[in-house]
Amino acid sequence: MTNTPSQSTSSSSDSPFTLSPSFVPQFHYPDRLLVGPGPSNVDPIVLSTMSRPLLGHLDPDFLHLMSMTQDMLRHLYRTDYPLTIPISATGMAGMECCFVNLIEPGDTVIVCCNGFFSQRMVDIATRAGAKVITFQRPWGEVFEENDLNAIEEILKKEKPKALGIVHAETSTGACQPLDRLGKLCHQYGTLLIVDAVTSLGCIPLEVKKWEIDAVYSCSQKGLSCPPGLSPVSFSPRAEEVMAGRKTKVQSWYLDLTMIRQYWNSDRAYHHTAPITMIFALFEGLRLIFTQGLENRWEMHQKNHLALKAGLEAIGLEYQANPKYQLPQLNVVKIPIGIEDLKFRKTLLNEYRMEIGGGLGEFKGKVWRIGLMGCNSNPAIVSKILSNMEQCLISQGKAIPK
Amino acid sequence: MTNTPSQSTSSSSDSPFTLSPSFVPQFHYPDRLLVGPGPSNVDPIVLSTMSRPLLGHLDPDFLHLMSMTQDMLRHLYRTDYPLTIPISATGMAGMECCFVNLIEPGDTVIVCCNGFFSQRMVDIATRAGAKVITFQRPWGEVFEENDLNAIEEILKKEKPKALGIVHAETSTGACQPLDRLGKLCHQYGTLLIVDAVTSLGCIPLEVKKWEIDAVYSCSQKGLSCPPGLSPVSFSPRAEEVMAGRKTKVQSWYLDLTMIRQYWNSDRAYHHTAPITMIFALFEGLRLIFTQGLENRWEMHQKNHLALKAGLEAIGLEYQANPKYQLPQLNVVKIPIGIEDLKFRKTLLNEYRMEIGGGLGEFKGKVWRIGLMGCNSNPAIVSKILSNMEQCLISQGKAIPK
């Protein structure tokens, strides 16, 4: 963290851009406990694998690794959908991939809006040329049993191409029940698109049983890998819709008709796969299945309960309805008298711990504390509670006895 | 490389997708000398940095690392363009980023076509709604001084929004001279878009001096990092065009109006940056500027000449016009009597060395041998020559004395 090239050359030449920097910058990589909404800390086994030398993207050994990775992803999504692939970009590219491959200009899309990320779906579906209709609930709430009738009315009236909904809303900490929505959508010929960015690997997600047609997630939360990949999975019904498209997919990079040739059939070159990130994903998945997926879900629930008891004991109140609280993402209200930015800065600089602030409507009102993947363990719960308490006391908050 | 989940569970359950795999697959990571068209071997210092624990994407230390990375990227591109950013996906996403941000439906685009990757520009520009006009030269040739008049005629007649051209054509090994094209384009209000995927860090590329308006590259070739990032840079003229857009950029993930807020101004969250890949890029750039960029160009040229002398000595003939031969990518004709796939398979399995086959028109006709970044050194030249000679002899080719 010394001189930057622009600083170091600005006085030494009239045209600094034509010269190499006279001082090459350095960086000291600090350690952090990352217990915000993600990225979350990466499992050390995954990190050490990232130092392995590369393989070519058409190397037979790498192709074998790809197939094993896809098989594990199918197990993770609880499905046997053939079109299950990690997209070569971060989670939000997975969202875009789902919409641009399924939607054509003029299609109608329903988005169930109750937080920051469903709002993104609206933006992305609109850019894909969709006529978007939103079905709104206040931030922090979910669509419940008694909303299904209203959703059915919209489906009946609009016969939309797709309905988009978020499973684990990262901005509010609320978990959306999904078990009945797929069947309902399919009664009206509508595809169900689900955002599983914060749910995959942390809580039960049954892609086939719940009749989900398109689902996307990320690598840096429940999978304990670095950010950079977006696992997606598509039902045969979704594949049929893609096969019947009249227009080309607007994004070349995310066009599954070509990407699938590389991953699922003749291994035709489309783009160079991000080899090291695929190594990481493979190892992250291996760790999950070595532990057992159901055990992993239980682990998230158990450590959440311990964290929740501790946070409430030091006077912090949860934002979401307890009935729908996500175990992996704990959204609590900022206590009166505590300054959001000052508190989080102290936590980061003095306690080396990162928690998340609020997004959108919740900005300055909540903190987001994640217990995701390998970070969901009693030692980290203990560290979070101790750090939060100490830091609150240091900023003048009285802790209840 | 043992059982895959699907193999291991297919006989143990009626609904294998609802169960964790009974055998967790394993993978032995082999070592390879990657001297094809890329990915190329990663510098060991970069690899070891990839094992560093993550930082959050809004951590002040990480934001500082981002700024230093951008500064070095500007030096690498020989420019001071503020909008210089590594896009969070592989090189081809950089190509798409340039076209979707600059082109609106109905715009005219000229593409200079002389290989596989210029053809991709046509596809991507078309998906962005452009009317595309191609100016063709045979594969392996370049657009020379005497083509400039014809290009000027098209510019004068069509007044296109942009002209796309490839600097180092990865399918043919030919280097496109670019020093006069930008000025010519600007006489007719046309933006110059350049593919520098295989040139950046290997051969002289003067983005500002040559008046390039949009340029993209990748991380896995001249920069000796893994694939996964695409550094792009845009001129102020290109920025003006973006600012004057009448329509939203069709790709949300590649929309620079939002990405630039995260990288260049108020650090507003757009998507979670691929932290580990940015660590890798920072270290890869550090290594280049520790050596010196001009020294790096010389190194590529010197080792190319040694490789070329050796390849010709064992009877291999170059494909491209010697005047335009790229030092970092040596495309040679497959000798008569040698089977392409069998030869490359032997090289990979027995010599642990990967070279590239031909793409498109050149499939089955050429081999592509890369000497990129940290792979451009005498020891690797020697290893390539020895392996090629031994493998050719083993497959019955007489080597000239």
Image (spheres, coloured by chain):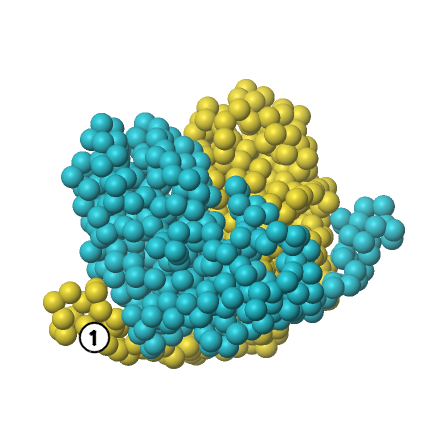
Chain colours: A cyan, B yellow
Residue A200, image x, y percentages: 36, 60
- Residue name at image x 42 percent, y 77 percent: B29
Q: Quadrant of the N terminus of chain A?
A: bottom right
Residue A54, image x, y percentages: 47, 70
Mark 1 — on which chain does it sit?
B
Q: Is residue A221 above or below residue A214?
A: below
Q: Quadrant of the C terminus of chain A?
A: bottom right
Residue A336, image x, y percentages: 61, 51
Residue A139, image x, y percentages: 44, 43
Q: Is B16 in front, or is A60? A: B16
Taking A38 as reference, is A350 left or right?
right
Residue denoted by label 1: B8
Q: Is residue B188 above or below residue B170?
A: above
Taking B235 as reference, is A286 left or right?
left
- Residue name at image x 66 percent, y 44 percent: B266
Q: Is residue A226 above or below residue B167?
A: below
- Residue name at image x 43 percent, y 51 percent: A320
Residue B80 visible in the picture:
yes
Category of crowding for the residue at label 1, using alpha-carbon neighbours closer than 10 angstroms: few (below 14), some (14–19), many (at least 20): some
Q: In the orientation shown, which residue stands out farthest toward the right?
A: A11
User: How many numbered circles does the render carry?
Assistant: 1
Q: In the orientation shown, which residue stands out farthest toward the top?
A: B157
Mark 1 secondary-structure assignment: helix
Residue B52 visible in the picture:
no
Q: Is A330 in front, or is A252? A: A330
Q: Is A9 in front, or is B161? A: A9
- Residue name at image x 45 percent, y 26 percent: B105
Residue type at mark 1 is Ser
Q: Indicate the quadrant where residue A344 lies.
A: bottom right
